[in-house]
Image (spheres, rainbow, N blue to C red):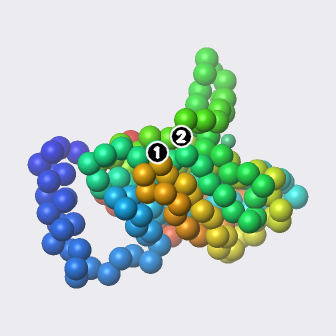
Amino acid sequence: MTSTLRSLGYIALLAGLFTAPARAEEVKAGDLVISQVWSRATPGGAKIAGGYLTIENKGSAPDLLIGGSGDFAGRVEVHEMAMNNGVMTMRSLDKGLAIEPGKTVKLAPGGYHLMLMDLKNPLKQGDKVPLTLEFQKAGKVKLALEVQGVGAQAPATGDHSGHVKK
Ligand SMILES: [Cu+2]
């Protein structure tokens, strides 16, 4: 995105602040806008699942996604999946995931994700599971994880317009 377009985006945003109703699935926390929080159903008693979401930083300072928690899971970690010499590997981002200012970071299958571990109950399609994320600056943010079907690659309510970073 060019800086001109980005400026226009900010102007549009400012103009819309007091008139446009926030979309229901968006959660604002400080400078962050979080949307498309979803996971997949876990049939067969799986104790682990991935969590996915989109985080936009509209501020001028970086933030850091440190981790999360929820009653449904014993542990929530931030992971990265990447190809390493042709092998798919996954590692825990112990220092957190940077959300740079002006950028949108997408946690999605095959890349960054939340690792939901020690699940207390199976995730069922259609469930909305309360989840709290923790950011260095924005602090704790309460969200709802929308559980999609087993093979879902993207949220069913997908809004793929505009601000997806690639
Ligand atoms: Cu993982």
Q: Is residue 89 visible?
A: yes
In this rendering, the answer to whether 105 lies above or below 33 is above
Give above or below for 114 relative to 92.
below
| Snapshot quadrant of residue 150 | bottom right
| Residue for point 50% across, 41% down | 97
Q: Position of residue 54 (x, y in %)?
A: 46, 55
Would residue 155 appear left or right of 49 to someone viewing this image? Answer: left
Q: Residue at x 55, y 35 (%)?
A: 95
Left or right: where does residue 14 sit relative to residue 32? left
Hey, what amino acid is under mark 1?
Leu
Foreground residue, 4 or 94? 94
Point 64% across, 70% down: residue: 130
User: Can the viewer see residue 113?
Assistant: no
126, 10: nearer the viewer: 10
Q: In terms of depth relative to the viewer, which is nearer, 15 or 123?
A: 15
Quadrant in the picture for residue 166: top left
Q: Which residue is mark 2?
A: 96
Q: Which residue is mark 1?
A: 64
Which residue type does callout 2 highlight? Answer: Gly
Ligand 1 lies in quarter = top right
- Up the image or down, 102 lies above or below 150; here it is above
**Residue 131 — which label?**
none
